[in-house]
Image (spheres, rainbow, N blue to C red):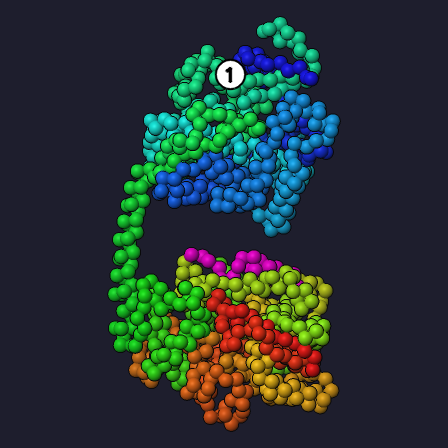
Amino acid sequence: MKPSLLISDPDIIRTVLTKNFDSFHNRGLTFNGKTNPLFYNLLTMSGSKWRKMRVKLTPAFTSGKIKRMFLILKECSDDLAKYLESKAQIRDSVEIKDIFTRYTTDVIMTTAFGVKSNCIEEPNNEYRSMGKKIFDINSIWIALFMFAPQILEFFSISLTPREVSSFYMNMFRENVEYRDKHNVVRHDFMNLLIQLMKKGYVESDGDKNGIDEPSTVSKLTMTEATAQSYVFFAAGFETSSTTATFALYELAQHHDIQDKVREEIDESLTKHGELTYDAINEMTYLHKVINETLRKYPPLPLLNRICTKDVYLPIVNVHLPKGTAITIPVYGLHHDPLIYPDPEKFDPERFNTDAVKKRHPYAYMPFGEGPRICIGARFGYVQTKVGLVNLLSKYKFDLDPRTHVPIVFKESSGVLAAKGGVHLIIKPHLKFTMVLAELIGATIVTLSILYIYFKFVIYNFWHKRGIFYIKPVVPIGNMGPLTTRKITAGVLFHDIYMKYKSHQIIGIYSFFKPNLVIADLELVRMVLIKEFTSFHDRGIYMNEKIDPLTNHLFLMSGKKWKNMRVKLTPTFTSGKIKQMFSILKNFGEELAQHLECKAEMGDCIEIKDIFARYSTDVIMSTAFGIKSNCIQDPDNVYRDHRKKIFEANPIWIAIILFVPQIMNLLFIPFTDRGIIRFYTKLFRETVEYRQTHKIIKHDFMNLLIQLMEKGFVESDGDKKTTDESSTVSKLTMLEAAAQSYVFFAAGFETSSTTATFALYELAQHHDVQDKVRKEIDEILTKHGELTYDAINEMTYLHKVINETLRKYPPLPILNRICTKDVYLPIVNVHLPKGTAITIPILGIHRDPSIYPDPDKFNPERFNADVVAERDPYAFLPFGEGPRVCIGARFGYIQTKVGLVNLLLKYKFKLHPRTSVPIVFKEESLILAAKDNVHLIIEPR
């Protein structure tokens, strides 16, 4: 119902697109921001809105900006090539359009939306699904969109499904908010759009406005920016993947051209050493191949314009009224035999410089021409080239018989696409295969040399010193059960102790590092106390530059540890903990109240989770001054971050404990970066709030603030409680945050684990449970309420907890390292500086020669007379000597308060789901039940 003028003369085309552009500056496509806000984009905009947006966006697509994004494209293309490797090895058939669409989706999702869509590996994920829906349009709708958009506007019909619009609008907004909140800056299109939203212009490399001053007046709204990101995605991923597909389709038929392109690629990569932006731009023959592909298969086979005012075309002596539609048949021009002789022939030589000069410049328009030429053409070229280079450098392509020759085009598509797909047979490129073979050969030689070095040099350490050792396996030493996730570190060293304890000392290898396991209590005493000056460091990972939260008392070494220990010791005195008791008491009562309804129903509870929430609330309050409310709200942010602290791969655990040099070498933090940011920010904000409002509380946070402000902790009489020498330096904010963090991380997990295992045992031994409860009743009757003094009078409860700590020491091993050469006279052994020492606490605690019937839970083992008969170094739940756990007293109190509050009101039975005996969780730094501890809770 609408007149449309088809233009087939290149001179008239020049008039429409360039000379008389002011009369044809609109495309005449549907543009209704209210019906579909995503159509408020550069492609469909008209008039002054288009002009202003074009000026704003032009600096985003400069060569310099695209060069900065090149690494992103390269990484995605590496993923593409790697994905196809297995298919190439078996000379499989691939549908190359689907493969390339997944690649271009990954590229543009990360550059335009800041999202790693991973479509190459996951072809059916939501990003790929939404991308398909953009172009899954009925051919009638396409015709209406291009030639009669008034109908769509009249009926308020959106060409894009609502779910697609909502998906991309939400994704863009969420990523912008995330980047703003976390100060994330990436070299991508999204970053440039954020600049346009915040400043109204795109910065150049020199940090100056990339556009003229008048256009900087207005900033993009969130909706406007989303629409530009969307059209960049929609237009970019489909056109580039289509071009790459047709290029490989032609190369698969013309092996001479494919070989010539590959030869150019090989030469360029050899020259540059790797794929770079400059290397891509030097590949002139590849550029000709892509141009010839765009000639034969222009992604957008026609161009639309509309007369924006009455105009006269002198070449044909025609007056056109305002509103007349113009169509330029790009596909027709590109296949005109008068312009391109034998047009169906694929011939990249058509784009030799001399051949191009002889042709009319408006006879080739894959991206349009004039002021409305595709703004992303340069990016499209680079994206397509990077994908093709990565594949052609490694693989060869042949046509699969299923592929139509010539191509049959798909009717229901907004761009030119093959109807039945393009199926190609992929196989390895000979040169790549040879390089791979050489690489494999070099790897075998290197591994052989390493094997010999490990076996005859590194693994000769104990043998040449005459020390009994367990035969290691290259390259993991004796860490095999840990790396295969069969057992925990605690169980591994328990088993070594039990099997070889008669040797007193056992040499093992923690990967490539010699490690001496101590199985004699007198030697344990020597390491922890007598020769402490030779074993004062743990030898565990600590790097405050990479991970500031590792700069704490537990991991510190040497003089730094000593100074910090002196400063912190006064914070854990009986008096200081007594001042914090009311905080613990309140949370203990809250814990008991929370379980009341479950007890009434005789319900099953997972007690570890319950106690972890209680411990988190206690320590978040005392260490960070925050009411985390985890008892009532188990899924809040504090609980979530708590879980992440101890989620670790067993291999990483072994590396952290035994070969921390690897983490230092690779600059890997022990703590997740998100956790570092969360806790340092939380600590700093709390300190600043207390200082601003002059808030003083009886908690650990207040004591740390004293150490930051004065360098010492005040006693109740407002006197220094540390020696003058320790007051010289004050703690920095980061140092204090690290101490607060380790108090939290170590305290909540060890206490909750101990309480969990205690209830696990009490649920099996009702006589012991009744005896503890009786003691609690008597003491509370005596004191009238739960007090610090009342807790300390509960001697049987203390025995129960000690027996729990014997059977289930939270830290089942102790690490030390020789800080200087040392002689151990008991075993007549000289140990060089740097030798790692491991004390197997779990093994010692379950040694039947020390604790008869060790698997039996028997609190009477901690009667005073029995303890007096035992070696004092046979019970080490908190370590011993100068590096004994500084927070042990607090840990006892915290655990006791929780248990007293529960045992006072409830009885516990074992639920059938709970494993007996306990199976320990492999991927945990501390001893924890693998399948959790489920108990039935009932009122007394």
Query: Is residue 668 in the magenta section?
Result: yes
Provide the residue designation for mark 1.
Answer: 333
What residue is drawn where x is 65% and y is 44%? 170
- In this view, the residue in front, 196 or 153, is 153
Which image quadrant is residue 894 in? bottom right
Location of the C terminus by quadrant is: bottom right
Q: Is residue 633 magenta?
A: no
Magenta segment, prevailing SS (helix, strand or loop): helix
- Residue 281 position (above or below residue 883): above
Task: Name the quadrant containing residue 49.
Answer: top right
For disc 1, the neighbor class at 10 Å (few under 14, some 14 to 19, many from 20) is many
Residue 571, image x, y percentages:
60, 76
Residue 695 sits in quarter: bottom right
Instruction: Say which quadrant the N terminus sits in.
Output: top right
How many numbered badges does the structure rendering display? 1
Name the element at disc 1: helix
Q: Is residue 267 left or right of residue 884?
A: left
Residue 671 seen in the figure: yes
Q: Is residue 437 left or right of residue 481?
A: left
Visible in this render: residue 283? Answer: no
Q: Residue at left 29%, top 77%?
A: 467
Q: Residue at x 54, y 81 (%)?
A: 804
The amino acid type, in three-letter code, at marker 1 is: Leu
> Residue drawn at (29%, 41%), measured in percent from left and top?
434
- Magenta part of the protein: which range? 666-687
Q: Residue 336, image x and y in percent?
A: 48, 14
